[in-house]
Structure formats: structure tokens, C-alpha cells
């Protein structure tokens, strides 16, 4: 990886806003988890595309924890950021909040996704390095390094 191509976390930071509509809810009048997973995957893909300047694919979604419910007419804020990069893969943290009218936010979900950059033949391709600027960037990198090592231990059949 060429240092000239390395990017900061801020360069690929992505936010998406949704208002939960009746078609987004489940039988318990809460946001349907599958809809939230779709939005999370889209935000993670945009973050990874912005970082890599490539098409990407989702390799895994992990640590998907639903911490509190979201209901019809709630404003949902989804924020994605690069936390760790390998040679072809990127780990993206996506936080989902319910944002009240006064601006206060409650964390609904935090997920970590692994995305891989693809070349024109849809094969994994090298990506830029990551420039760590803040203490949060550095802490996420260290945690991402550990998560990456755990993922490698869990691989089955060379995947």
C-alpha cells in the first residue's frame, strides 16, 4: 500500500437519516430488525467504497446487538466509520441511534461489518492504508486488529 493513497477515517465517514414509517415495523410495533440490517449494510458499503474507491462486497456482519427499540415516526441516525483495514478488507463500525426532536440520541445498535474491495473481475484488490488521527481512531484500530485475528482463527475451509 502506498502511503500517498492512505486516507483518514473522516474521509469515508458516512451518515444516513431515516424516519421510521409504518412499513418498517414488525408485529410488535418496533423497527423490523431486517430493515435495520439492510440500512446498516448500505451505510457500511458506502464507507468502504469511499475508502477504497472500489466496488465492495460484505464478507461478514458481526457483533450485531439490538440495545433498544425504535418506533414509528422515530428519526434514525446511522453513522458508519472505518475502524481497521487489511490488504483487501475493511472493518466498518456502524452505530444506529434514535434521535429525538431535541437532538438527544439513544444508541439502538452497534455492528461491525467486514467489507472487501473488488477489482473489475470481482476479485479482492488492494486498498489504501488508514491514517489514524484521534485517540478514538487508534483505540478502534487496536480493537479491530484483535477482531481480525479472531476472525482468522474462526475461518473454515480457508474462507
Image (cartoon, grey):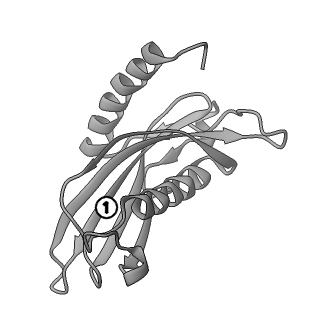
Query: Is the residue marked by circle 1 packed among few (<14), some (14-19), or many (20+) residues within 10 Å?
Result: many
Q: Residue at x 26, y 36 (%)?
A: 139
* 134 sits left or right of 14 in the view: left
Relative to 59, does residue 19 appear above or below in the rendering? below
Q: Secondary structure at mark 1?
A: strand
| Quadrant of the image containing the N terminus | top right
Q: Identify which residue, 49 or 94, lies in the foreground.
A: 94
Total marks in image = 1
Q: Is residue 136 left or right of residue 33?
A: left
Residue 61 position in % (x across, y down): 44, 41
* Residue identifier under label 1: 96
Residue 34, quarter of picture = bottom left
Q: Write the residue at 41% across / 18% down.
A: 149
On-image quarter of the C terminus: top right
Measuring 15% from the left and 75% from the top, which residue is drawn there? 104
**Whole-percent x and y of residue 57?**
63, 44
133 up-or-down from 19: above or below: above
Q: Percent from the top left, x then y, of residue 19?
A: 36, 81
Residue ID at (56%, 54%): 45
Q: Residue furthest right?
A: 121
Q: Is residue 42 left or right of residue 147?
A: right
Q: Is residue 73 above or below residue 52?
A: below
Amino acid at each position: 500500500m502506498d502511503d500517498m493513497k492512505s486516507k483518514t477515517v473522516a474521509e469515508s465517514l458516512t451518515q444516513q437519516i431515516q424516519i421510521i414509517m409504518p412499513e418498517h415495523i414488525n408485529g410488535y410495533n418496533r423497527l423490523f430488525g431486517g430493515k435495520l440490517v439492510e440500512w446498516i449494510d448500505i451505510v457500511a458499503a458506502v464507507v468502504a467504497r469511499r475508502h477504497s474507491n472500489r466496488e465492495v462486497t460484505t464478507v461478514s456482519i458481526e457483533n450485531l446487538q439490538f440495545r433498544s427499540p425504535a418506533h414509528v415516526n422515530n428519526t434514525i441516525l446511522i453513522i458508519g466509520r472505518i475502524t481497521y483495514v487489511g490488504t483487501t478488507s475493511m472493518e466498518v463500525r456502524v452505530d444506529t441511534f434514535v434521535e429525538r426532536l431535541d437532538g438527544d440520541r439513544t444508541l439502538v445498535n452497534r455492528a461491525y461489518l467486514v467489507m472487501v474491495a473488488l477489482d473489475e473481475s470481482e476479485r479482492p484488490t488492494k486498498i489504501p492504508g488508514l491514517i489514524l488521527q484521534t485517540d478514538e481512531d487508534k483505540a478502534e484500530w487496536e480493537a479491530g486488529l484483535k477482531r481480525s485475528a479472531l476472525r482468522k482463527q474462526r475461518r473454515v475451509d480457508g474462507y
